[in-house]
């Protein structure tokens, strides 16, 4: 099989890169990664060498280039069915794709109010109502999905899946900004934070030398 390569933004800040990397890591397949420093004079030129959209992450698999996170998840799910990136049950799988797509397309207020910055702990004294609505919707999704499909493990559908990868940056944001959660949402947050792949990413983010001043 051709070599898998993934191109990422700074691990400290790049939420979409985290999602794509976690899905790839969950396949168990060997891969190489390249981190492209963001907000540098040549950043966009470098990214466009690898990504036709000019965005990250982008996956290369031989001559195949996949440059969008949900597309990366679907591609890897087809290539590595044994990894179980989506639930086997059709009803659960439909829900997993729905909540992954909702994360992909929504929660703009939360993204703006609570930026991802793995290295920092910066508790917000006040969260804007629109961002709070997003938090409430996300935690309701977590509780509902766990109650319906989470009996087999600590994640949304029991075992770690692409849906968990989609919400992993939210977990990081909740830690950075000290978001108070109910006990069920907190237990799920902690399970994602303690996942070995997530811990590997967090450690790498903390060790990164690159700093983007406007994001710190």
Image (spheres, rainbow, N blue to C red):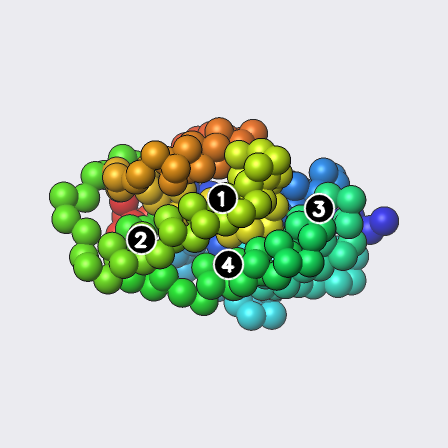
**N-terminal label among 3 and 2:** 3
Q: CA distance from mark 3 to mark 2?
A: 28 Å
Asked if the residues shown at circle 4 and circle 3 are in contact, with their CB atoms under 8 angstroms apart, the answer is no
* Position of residue 34 in the picture relative to residue 145 (left or right): right
Which quadrant would residue 187 be assigned to in this image?
Answer: top left
- Would residue 96 be visible to someone looking at this image? yes
* In the foreground, 210 or 112: 112
Instruction: Name the residue carrying label 4.
Output: 99
Q: CA distance from mark 2 to mark 4?
A: 14 Å
Q: CA distance from mark 4 to mark 3?
A: 17 Å
Which residue lies at the image location 52% right of the left edge and 58% below the top edge? Answer: 100
* In the foreground, 25 or 77: 77
Instruction: Name the residue carrying label 3.
Output: 84
Q: Residues within 10 Å of mark 1 (few under 14, many from 20)?
A: few
Which of the two discs, 2 and 1, sits closer to the camera? 1
Q: CA distance from mark 3 to mark 1?
A: 20 Å
Instruction: Name the residue carrying label 1.
Output: 147
Report x, y in % for residue 167. Answer: 47, 49
Asked if the residues shown at circle 2 and circle 4 are in contact, with their CB atoms under 8 angstroms apart, the answer is no
- Kind of element beneath mark 2: helix
Report x, y in % for residue 207. Answer: 44, 31
**N-terminal label among 4 and 3:** 3
Asked if the residues shown at circle 3 and circle 1 are in contact, with their CB atoms under 8 angstroms apart, the answer is no
Q: Residues within 10 Å of mark 2 (few under 14, many from 20)?
A: few
Which of the two discs, 3 and 2, sits closer to the camera? 2
Which residue lies at the image location 85% right of the left edge and 49% below the top edge? Answer: 1
Residue placed furthest toward the front: 148
- Kind of element beneath mark 1: helix
């Amino acid at each position: 099989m051709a070599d898998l390569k993934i191109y990422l933004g700074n691990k400290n800040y790049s939420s979409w890169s985290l999602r794509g990397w976690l899905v790839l890591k969950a396949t168990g397949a060997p891969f190489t990664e390249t981190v492209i420093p963001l907000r540098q004079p040549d950043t966009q030129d470098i990214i466009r060498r690898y990504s036709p959209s000019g965005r990250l992450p982008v996956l290369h698999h031989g001559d195949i280039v996949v440059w969008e996170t949900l597309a990366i998840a679907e591609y890897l799910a087809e290539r590595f069915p044994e990894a179980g990136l989506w639930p086997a049950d059709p009803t659960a799988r439909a829900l997993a794709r729905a909540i992954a797509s909702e994360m992909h397309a929504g929660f703009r207020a939360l993204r703006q109010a609570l930026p991802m910055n793995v290295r920092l702990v910066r508790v917000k004294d006040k969260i804007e109502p629109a961002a709070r609505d997003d938090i409430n919707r996300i935690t309701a999704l977590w509780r509902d999905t766990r109650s319906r499909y989470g009996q087999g493990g600590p994640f949304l559908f029991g075992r770690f899946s692409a849906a968990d990868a989609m919400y992993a940056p939210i977990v990081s944001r909740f830690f950075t900004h000290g978001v108070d959660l109910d006990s069920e949402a907190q237990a799920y947050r902690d399970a994602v934070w303690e996942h070995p792949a997530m811990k590997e990413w967090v450690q790498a983010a903390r060790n990164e030398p690159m700093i983007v001043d406007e994001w710190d």
